Amino acid sequence: MAKKSKNTRSGIVYSTDPGFNYQNDEPEETETLSPRQQDLKVWLDRKQRKGKVVTLITGFAGREKDLSDLGKMLKSRLGTGGAAKEGEILIQGDFRDKVIEILSGMDYRVKKAGG
């Protein structure tokens, strides 16, 4: 038995209006701002991580692809693991000063936040 594909037309099967346009409920992706327009904050976080320290970069405005590319570049430059999703980049370990140095070198506006 074949799987049914998800219908992207939101339940509309037929319309007699010749000027009718289907509207998708998907939000449009925002354009990624230039690095000089980004206001990034770099946090050191331990909450809900069983005492492990992570470096959290928040405030990225743009497409998910650009966020994941920036996260991948940071992880490779620092030689550590992490994740990039929902506008945040998570780097395993305490790399706050190194992350600020790398992002400042790429013309991002970066602030050290948190305790």
Image: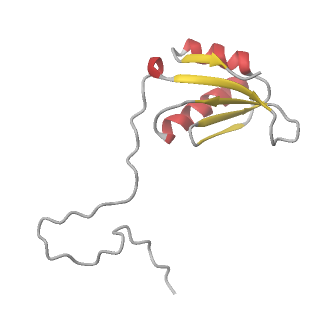
Residue at far bottom of view:
1
**Mark count:** 0
From the viewer's perspective, tell me whether residue 52 is left or right of residue 45. right
Q: Position of residue 102 (x, y in %)?
A: 62, 16
User: Which of the two residues, 94 or 37, is positioned nearer the viewer here?
Assistant: 37
Residue at far front of view:
115
User: Which of the two residues, 2 or 88, is positioned nearer the viewer here?
Assistant: 88
From the viewer's perspective, tell me whether residue 79 is left or right of residue 30. right
**Residue 4 drawn above or below residue 40:** below
From the viewer's perspective, tell me whether residue 47 is left or right of residue 4. right
Q: Position of residue 27 (x, y in %)?
A: 40, 51
Scheme by which the image is coloured: secondary structure
User: Which of the two residues, 114 or 55, is positioned nearer the viewer here?
Assistant: 114
Q: Position of residue 97 (x, y in %)?
A: 72, 15
Residue at far left of view:
18
**Residue 94 drawn above or below residue 46:** above
Q: Quadrant of residue 12?
A: bottom left
Tell me which residue sits at (81%, 34%) in the image.
46
Tell me which residue sits at (81%, 43%) in the image.
48
Tell me which residue sits at (58%, 13%) in the image.
104
Q: Position of residue 24 (x, y in %)?
A: 34, 60
Q: Quadrant of residue 77?
A: top right
Image quarter where the C terminus lies is: top right
Tell me which residue sits at (64%, 29%) in the image.
57
**Residue 18 drawn above or below residue 42:** below
From the viewer's perspective, tell me whether residue 82 is left or right of residue 41. right
